[in-house]
Amino acid sequence: MAIALLVDFGSTFTKVLAIDLAAEEILAYAQSGTTVETDITVGLQRALNLLPSALQRGPFECKLASSSAAGGLGMVAIGLVPELSAEAARRAALGAGAKVLKVFSFRLSARELEALEENKPDIILLAGGTDGGNEEVIIENARKLSQSNIQCPIIVAGNKAATDEVLSILSTGGKTSLVTDNVMPEVNVIHVEPSREMIRQVFIQRIIKAKGLKKAEEFVESILMPTPTAVLRAAQLLAKGTDTEPGFGDLAIVDVGGATTDVHSIGRGNPSQPGVVCKGLPEPLAKRTVEGDLGIRYNAASILKICGQGRFLRNVHFPNPELPQKLEALSQNVSLLPQSAEELDLDFALASCAAQAAMERHAGTIETLWGPQGQFYLQYGKDLTGIEHLIGTGGIFIHHPQAGALLQKMLFSPEEPFSLKPKNPGLYTDARYCLFAVGLLADRFPDRALRIAKKYLKKWN
Amino acid sequence: MTRKKTVVLGVLGVDAHVVGNKIMAHALESAGFKVANIGTFSSQEDFIRAAIESAADAILVASLCGHGEMECRGFRENCLEAGLDNIHLVAGGNLVVGKQTWEEVERRFLEMKFNRVYPPGVSPQKVIEDLKKDLANNQESEVGSQKSEVRNQNQE
């Protein structure tokens, strides 16, 4: 029996999943608190001990892990024009599973450089200029970085005509730098895949060690990627399929967590209506957005402010006389799990608001313009109205009895016709918490990983 | 190897006329220019951002809906504000509607500090020839002196 052991070192919990690769079955799941401050392997061992004893010792066909422990992968993106190369760099970092701490554009000021140092990024992505375009700004920014106290690796992904000089300046300053393709080789052309791959390589080779997670690799073969990347990989595999196993086609995955709410979408997102013109920087095929203000624990109090009392109260079914105080208490006690019907209901409302707002920010929008020739429609971002699959993951979708109703909250609404959210997708939840594992297995066992995902996603409609 | 001259090309304002835009982009590329074509429905800001990122030598603004004069107001000032001190500004298309003489329209665009302005039906060839000449001249001269020079050429 070939068993794969998949581990996710989460920010709060270390999760282990044992999968029988031959039978394509999930054998067991267990979790225990992540112990990154002391020794990451302690928490892992505790989680392993919770598995059935026959599974604890292996042998395992493979032991793979993802990690968002120790703050995840924190990145700073630098570009030239905020809406162009800086935005392309930001998207490249997000798609690589990073937490984008800051985005800078134009020439870095002394104050910005200071803020950059304070943010202590794990990696800096330095872009700016189309190929053959502006060289001065990326060169000057390289000079400023080289004279700073920054120690983290710098990935250079800007104007190729400036690359040699940028690298030489950075190496003179004793900085670790690597080079890859320009994130925006031409105006309005986005080319993020090479940067994403390089970020992942740097993560494996350097960041794991820098964060004190290397010890985990004594047990697992390797920590392959940040957790969000594993989910995005799973999304890509599930959408695209393999040579022998058909995929789902265009889809979206929503990950509602305690600290953030992530949305991943796979698809071109071209206009579904005639006469609509796309504007703005083109979207990556695999797009990830992260909402750092929509975590249902850390941001419980601010979700109420962001979504407004009206929307919030439409989602609760019990009277909550001291709502702000209750939410404040939740954000102070982030590991609290709902017990009573009231608490479950409050979580439902929080997650509804978070998921809805996250989907609104992720999905494209339509702007109406009137000109001498009549009315025009401009589309910014992706049109997701036609996607056929919407998948929820994260604790709330796994444990909450109304997970299906929660997914409904993210759908298109005739009241907001210009927000291009999914209209009529199949609704699924990652009921066995296997998507991260599918992402980890995607490269080595694509067919099996895909069939496992299809088998264990729970359909709600 | 000298760097290819780079131009930003687009259609300004609420304007869907895409055919001339594609023809012009093709003609410019064939003539050896690097073209950042931002297409239809572009704002002044879109042109300026693209010009900064691509270190463009010129911005070519098309307007065919008849609102060109209104849409082009403040273009030079916005370029200066964004640090594009010496950018060569060209406008063309159906810039205005109504009974107006071309000389009158041209004068107003030159006053707005466009370096060149073309009437409807101008051939891409003419625009390209002028552009090559102007960009060669521009390498040393200033915006102010270009303006008078352009005027002189237009009077020929």
Image (cartoon, grey):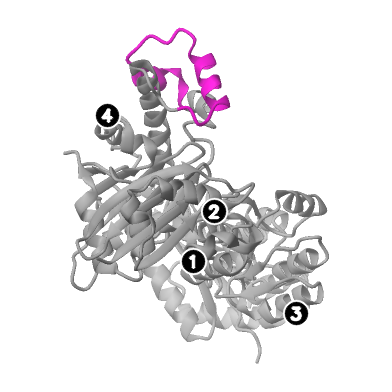
Circle on res. A117: none
Q: Amino acid at mark 4?
A: Gln
- Is B105 left, or right, of A356 in this rendering? right
What residue lies at 64% left-to-right and 84% top-to-bottom?
B3
- Pointer 4: what residue? A402
Nearer the observer: mark 1 or 4; the answer is 1
Nearer the observer: mark 2 or 3; the answer is 2
Secondary element under disc 4, as helix, strand or loop, is: loop
Marks 4 and 3 share the same chain: yes
Q: How far apart, in angstroms, are the residues tagged by discs 1 and 2?
A: 13 Å
First reached walking from the N terminus: tag 4 or tag 3: 3
- Pointer 1: what residue? A222
What residue lies at 42% left-to-right and 48% top-to-bottom?
A49
Q: Chain of mark 1?
A: A
Circle on res. A41: 2
What residue lies at 57% left-to-right and 46% top-to-bottom?
A35
Per the rendered image, the range of residues in magenta is A307-336
Q: How far apart, in angstroms, are the residues tagged by discs 1 and 4?
A: 36 Å
